[in-house]
Image (spheres, rainbow, N blue to C red):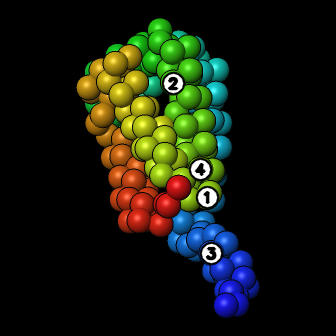
Amino acid sequence: MTTDFNQHDTLISHDFERPVLPSGLNVLTILTFIGSALQLIGGLFNFYNSQKIFEQKDKMIAQMNSGEMPAFAKSLMGDPAHFEELATKSFENRLPILIITLVAAALCIVGALQMRQLKKQGYLLYVIGELLPFLSMVLFIGLFSMSGVGFMVGAGITLIFIVLYTTYRKNLVY
């Protein structure tokens, strides 16, 4: 009776092949790194310029009401009454807003890195990182901060990315 040891000891090459990162997920994560870098820059910019905006808010409101300001700029700033409160609360809460912005960007970066390694937990970290800034806006500034074209564009991009990442969840295997 002879036993063929090679039959059981042979390693099949496909047993060790790792799943490949889909090209769409690769592009999404690269765009996430770029967006997170912009978020970090924007957060630092807002932190350092919040006092200047707070000090010049009356002048800016006067420009909004006088018609000197182009319509697209007015739409980005929202209602003049809300802009005053936005500038005040943004200045008063600039440090917690900066901290949340930095944490959110870090979560998005770590989540994207993990999704590049096809780890499922990366998706959750990414989604939390994307939604955290909206929560901080409501907590530290108020619901009126969710008005205007700037908010709509940001929320739209966030929603698109979350939906796109959701379509690639099936590729996350670890």
Give the distance between the C-alpha atoms of the residues marked 2 and 4, in whole angstroms. Answer: 21 Å
Give the distance between the C-alpha atoms of the residues marked 4 and 3, in whole angstroms. Answer: 22 Å
Which sits in the foreground, 63 or 146?
146
Q: Which of the two labelled residues, at mark 2 and mark 1, occupies the earlier sequence position?
A: 2
Q: Are discs 2 and 4 less than 8 Å apart at CB?
A: no
Label 4 Cα neighbours within 10 Å, binned few <14 / some 14-19 / many ≥20: many
Q: Which residue is mark 2?
A: 100
Q: Is residue 108 visible?
A: yes
Give the distance between the C-alpha atoms of the residues marked 2 and 3, in whole angstroms. Answer: 43 Å
Q: Position of residue 2 (x, y in %)?
A: 70, 90
Q: Which of the two labelled residues, at mark 3 and mark 1, occupies the earlier sequence position?
A: 3
Q: Which residue is mark 4?
A: 114
Amino acid type at mark 2:
Ile
Vertical position of residue 49 compared to residue 71: above or below: above
Q: Which residue is mark 1?
A: 116
Report the disc number at residue 15. 3
Amino acid type at mark 4:
Gln
Q: Are discs 4 and 1 less than 8 Å apart at CB?
A: yes
Q: Position of residue 166 (x, y in %)?
A: 38, 59
Q: Which of the two labelled residues, at mark 4 and mark 3, occupies the earlier sequence position?
A: 3
